[in-house]
């Protein structure tokens, strides 16, 4: 593959552009999807006696990865009552002298909410005197609907950005992710990565180079605009078919639908399987999202509308509590 | 890919044939190379307070993986004085009530030595009353020179076989490995695998199916015969060019060359870099292999002969201790 710029160099340039920092290939570890980037970072940085701050609600793999590393998950709330927005006082209360790692995910899975610049500045200023490292999960960062979300790495230098191609290039099965951050931390992450998997598929790594061509970047932009449109289509369908509150965030491809009037979210999600519609119960992502369903609008518009019709039909069979 | 037998089913059938046991897809976890199969097994099975038995010499990733899991490596010797053969009394001495996991690797990396059936029976009988699980690293099992090596899984049911396509199909960069064993253990390994990487590249998994076709099996057999020939070529070159003792095992693609008359192996390996010949110092694999170089004969015969000539030239510059 003579003539191709090495993948790590392309990733470094991409995140330099995205943060205003200067990353080189030595700041990058390529992994088997972002899952391994998260895993290797948690394992390399946190251990017994350490606290790891996680958003509630948040991606369900985080707390288990923290427990595998022997560290203690501590939650800061993104309150449902505030449309799952960032809550400074809850964040501040969760921070202690034992905090070793802080997860920041923007846009969020499951809520799609973005953390704004002033809140990121708040996080950076609160961590300034700590020995905490931030892990910034930016897997959805390219999928935004208005302004491009900022990165906490713009404000806090001890940040490990994790990302990958599964969302921005729809290359889920190819398993290409990465961690980008200060060289010393990346060296530790790379050691953990080498003992966990040795390396990501070289076939996938060579294909991944295409994501950083003008054509690849244009494909991401096209998908971004299409997802923004699909979010509006789903919101409109909900307003027409289902008389329930919902939260549509500023990025990713999820809507949180408030089904709390029917009780806990898991039985509701299970009941909807009879209508052949798949939703994720909010309880899977934390306490704060209990009573909600996570709906995905990554599918074709016609399927989104059909899904909401089925969901409305399914809910009509349930009894309010 | 309609019409293809799922990969896990093919792997189950392959190891059922190789052991006389009955494995199904539920006994298989597909991983990002055998490295992840090893890692996930160690992490799922062993932890603080556990002892893990490793061969000295052995593959260099094992002890670090054991330490990442928080367990204690304990070594049984494969004595250099006995051409790195299995040593029953050393094995028996290393086994304690704390032994949770036992590594068995046949053919061995770095020595290529195979553990015979009577020694495997000995291992099984000694472990019978323990609560130990065996991890059988069979990555080189298809690359043998006379009789096909037996698997410890034929004798000991609580065995997790790990293997992959990097050696038997020369598919190193594709990163396809697997763990095969009792369903309950495989379930735990699969959980660890999911939090470490989610899954192996689907592109690679689809390509991997070809390894189990008649054409794929024939390609492995052809490579096996060619490697047997190359081992003889390297041995002959050593006898002609270098007047030093060596060990050629019954499988894999390595010769252990005794360079102890020149002192420690690492400085010898480093000195040979000046002759543009790459060898692995035995010290990387354990105490028992110190004083040896691991030479690989996976390359073309002409390169093997050129490599041994360079090695002879390099050694002629060194002073015996």
Image (cartoon, coloured by chain):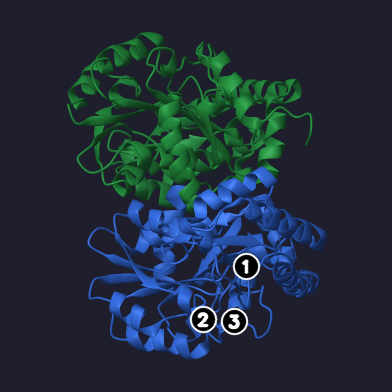
Chain colours: A green, B blue
Mark 3–mark 2 distance (CA, rounded to whole Å): 8 Å
Q: Position of residue A179 (x, y in %)?
A: 49, 32
Identify the residue shown where x is 32% and y is 14%.
Answer: A124
Q: Position of residue B193 (x, y in %)?
A: 46, 54
Q: Give how far apart the Cα atoms at labels 1 and 3 are.
A: 18 Å
Where disc 3 sits, the SS reads loop
Quickly name the residue at label 1: B255
Q: Nearer the viewer, residue A269 or B87?
A: B87
Residue A134 in view here = yes
**Residue bearing the label numbered 2:** B115
Q: Residue at x 56, y 22 (%)?
A: A24
The chain ID associated with circle 3 is B
Position in image of residue B185 (x %, y %): 40, 69
Q: Chain of mark 1?
A: B
In the figure, is residue B36 to the left or right of B167?
left
Report x, y in % for residue A186.
Answer: 45, 32
Nearer the observer: mark 1 or 3; the answer is 1
Disc 3 and disc 2 in contact, CB within 8 angstroms: yes
Chain designation of label 2: B
Q: Is residue B300 left or right of residue B206?
A: right
Q: Is residue B181 left or right of residue A212?
A: left
Q: Which residue is mark 3?
A: B149
Q: Residues within 10 Å of mark 3 (few under 14, many from 20)?
A: many
Quadrant in which the C terminus of chain A appears: top left
Q: Between marks 1 and 2, how big is the CA–CA gap?
A: 17 Å
Which residue sits at x=41%, y=28%?
A184
Judge whether B302 appears above or below A165 on screen.
below
Q: Nearer the viewer, residue B265 or A182?
A: B265
In front here: A286 or B172? B172
Label 1: few (<14), some (14–19) or many (≥20) C-alpha neighbours in 10 Å:
many
Cβ atoms under marks 1 and 2 closer than 8 Å: no
Whether discs 1 and 3 lie on one chain: the answer is yes
């Amino acid at each position: 593959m003579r003539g191709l710029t090495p993948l790590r160099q392309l990733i470094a340039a991409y995140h330099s552009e995205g943060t205003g920092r200067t990353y080189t290939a030595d700041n990058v570890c390529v992994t088997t999807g972002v899952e391994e980037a998260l895993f290797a970072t948690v394992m390399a940085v946190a251990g017994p006696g350490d606290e790891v701050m996680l958003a509630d609600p948040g991606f369900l793999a985080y707390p288990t990865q923290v427990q595998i590393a022997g560290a203690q998950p501590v939650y800061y709330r993104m309150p449902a009552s505030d449309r799952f927005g960032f809550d400074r006082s809850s964040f501040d209360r969760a921070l202690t002298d034992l905090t070793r790692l802080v997860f920041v995910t923007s846009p969020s899975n499951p809520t799609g909410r973005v953390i704004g610049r002033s809140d990121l500045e708040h996080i950076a200023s609160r961590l300034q005197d700590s020995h905490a490292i931030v892990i910034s999960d930016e897997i959805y960062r390219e999928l935004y609907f208005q302004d491009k979300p900022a990165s906490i790495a713009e404000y806090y230098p001890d940040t490990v950005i994790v990302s990958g191609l599964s969302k921005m290039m729809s290359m889920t099965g190819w398993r290409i992710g990465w961690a980008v951050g200060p060289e010393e931390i990346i060296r530790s992450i790379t050691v953990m990565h080498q003992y966990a998997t040795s390396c990501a598929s070289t076939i996938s790594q060579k294909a991944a180079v295409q994501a950083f061509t003008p054509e690849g970047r244009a494909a991401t932009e096209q998908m971004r605009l299409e997802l923004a449109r699909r979010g509006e289509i789903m919101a409109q369908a909900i307003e027409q078919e289902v008389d329930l509150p919902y939260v549509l965030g500023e990025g990713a491809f999820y809507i949180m639908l408030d089904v709390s009037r029917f009780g806990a979210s898991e039985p509701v999600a299970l009941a909807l399987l009879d209508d052949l519609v798949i939703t994720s119960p909010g309880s899977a992502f934390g306490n704060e999202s209990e009573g909600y369903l996570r709906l995905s609008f990554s599918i074709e518009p016609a399927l989104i509308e059909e899904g909401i019709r089925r969901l409305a039909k399914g809910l009509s069979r349930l009894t309010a509590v």
